[in-house]
C-alpha cells in the first residue's frame, strides 16, 4: 500500500500551493478534492460559483455522509497509490474522509495555516467571482468549519504556516517532504483515519 499525503486547511491558506510543492519534491501525483466537486457540478449542469459548490458539497455529504468527497476521488487515489506508491490528496475537509482514503494506503495529514488577513489577500488576488471581501471569507470559513476542517487541522501530523512568502513556505514543505520520503509516513497517525 502506498503513502497518501492528505493536505487540509482553511480556504486560501495555500493548500494547492503546498500540494504542488510536495508533488514536485516527492514525485507524487496530486488529486484535488475541490476539482472533483467542480467536475461533479459540471456533470450535473450546475454553476461553479463558491456558493453553488458549497451547496453541492453539503448535498453530497447529506446523502453519502461526511466522507462523500473522499468517495468521489477514491478510485483515482487507489489507482495512483498502486501505480506510483504515493499520492497527494488536496482539500480534505472532514475527519470522515480519512478512513475512506486510508483504504488506499497509509495516510499522513498535513495542515496548512494562514491568518485570515493573509487568506483574504489571496482570495482577492484570485479574482474569482464571489470570493472578495470579509463577508465572503467568513461564509466560506463557516461552511468549511461545519464540514469539519477544524477537526482535521487539530489532528494534523504536520503543520505548515504559510505567512511569510514562497521561500519560507518551500523550506517548510521540503522539511515535511524529507520526513515523509525517508519515513514513508511511519510517524503519521493519519488523523486517526488509518484502515484496520
Image: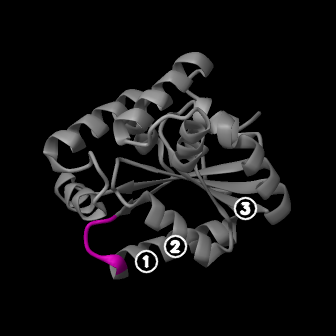
User: Does dot 2 land on a helix, a strand or a loop?
Assistant: helix
Measuring from the top left, give residue 35's x and y in whole percent.
Answer: 55, 50
Of 80 and 43, nearer the camera is 43
User: Does dot 3 land on a helix, a strand or a loop?
Assistant: strand
Q: CA distance from mark 2 to mark 1?
A: 7 Å
Measuring from the top left, give residue 14's x and y in whole percent.
Answer: 38, 61
User: Does dot 1 land on a helix, a strand or a loop?
Assistant: helix
Q: Earlier in the sequence, mark 3 or mark 2?
A: 2
Span colored in magenta: 162-166
Report which residue position mark 2 lands on: 21
Residue at x-position 53% and y-position 44%: 38
One can see residue 139 in this view: yes
Report which residue position mark 1 lands on: 170
Report which residue position mark 3 lands on: 86
Q: Earlier in the sequence, mark 2 or mark 1?
A: 2
Instruction: Give the mark count.
Output: 3
Q: Quadrant of residue 179?
A: bottom right
- 115 over 134 or under it: above or below: below
- 68 over 190 or under it: above or below: above
One can see residue 193 in this view: no
Q: CA distance from mark 1 to mark 3?
A: 20 Å
Measuring from the top left, give residue 117's x and y in whole percent.
Answer: 16, 56
Q: Residues within 10 Å of mark 2 (few under 14, many from 20)?
A: some
Colour mapping: one colour
- 94 over 84 or under it: above or below: above
> Which SS does the magenta portion mostly show?
loop
Q: Are marks 2 and 1 in contact (CB under 8 Å)?
A: yes
Residue at x-position 30% and y-position 39%: 140
Amino acid at each position: 500500500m502506498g503513502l497518501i499525503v492528505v493536505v487540509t486547511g482553511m480556504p486560501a491558506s495555500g493548500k494547492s500551493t503546498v500540494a504542488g510543492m510536495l508533488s514536485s519534491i516527492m514525485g507524487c501525483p496530486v488529486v484535488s478534492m475541490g476539482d472533483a466537486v467542480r467536475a461533479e457540478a459540471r456533470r450535473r449542469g450546475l454553476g461553479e460559483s463558491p456558493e453553488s459548490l458549497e451547496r453541492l458539497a453539503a448535498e453530497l455529504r447529506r446523502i453519502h455522509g461526511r466522507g462523500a468527497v473522499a468517495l468521489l476521488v477514491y478510485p483515482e487515489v487507489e489507482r495512483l497509490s498502486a501505480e506510483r506508491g504515493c499520492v497527494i490528496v488536496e482539500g480534505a475537509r472532514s475527519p470522515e474522509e480519512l478512513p475512506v482514503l486510508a483504504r488506499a494506503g497509509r495516510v499522513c495529514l498535513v495542515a496548512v495555516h494562514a491568518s485570515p488577513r493573509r487568506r483574504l489577500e489571496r482570495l482577492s488576488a484570485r479574482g474569482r467571482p464571489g470570493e472578495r471581501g470579509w463577508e465572503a471569507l467568513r461564509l466560506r470559513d463557516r461552511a468549511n468549519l461545519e464540514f469539519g476542517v477544524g477537526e482535521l487541522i487539530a489532528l494534523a501530523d504536520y503543520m505548515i504556516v504559510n505567512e511569510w512568502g514562497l521561500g519560507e513556505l518551500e523550506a517548510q514543505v521540503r522539511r515535511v517532504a524529507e520526513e515523509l520520503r525517508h519515513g514513508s509516513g511511519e510517524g503519521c497517525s493519519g488523523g486517526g483515519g488509518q484502515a484496520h
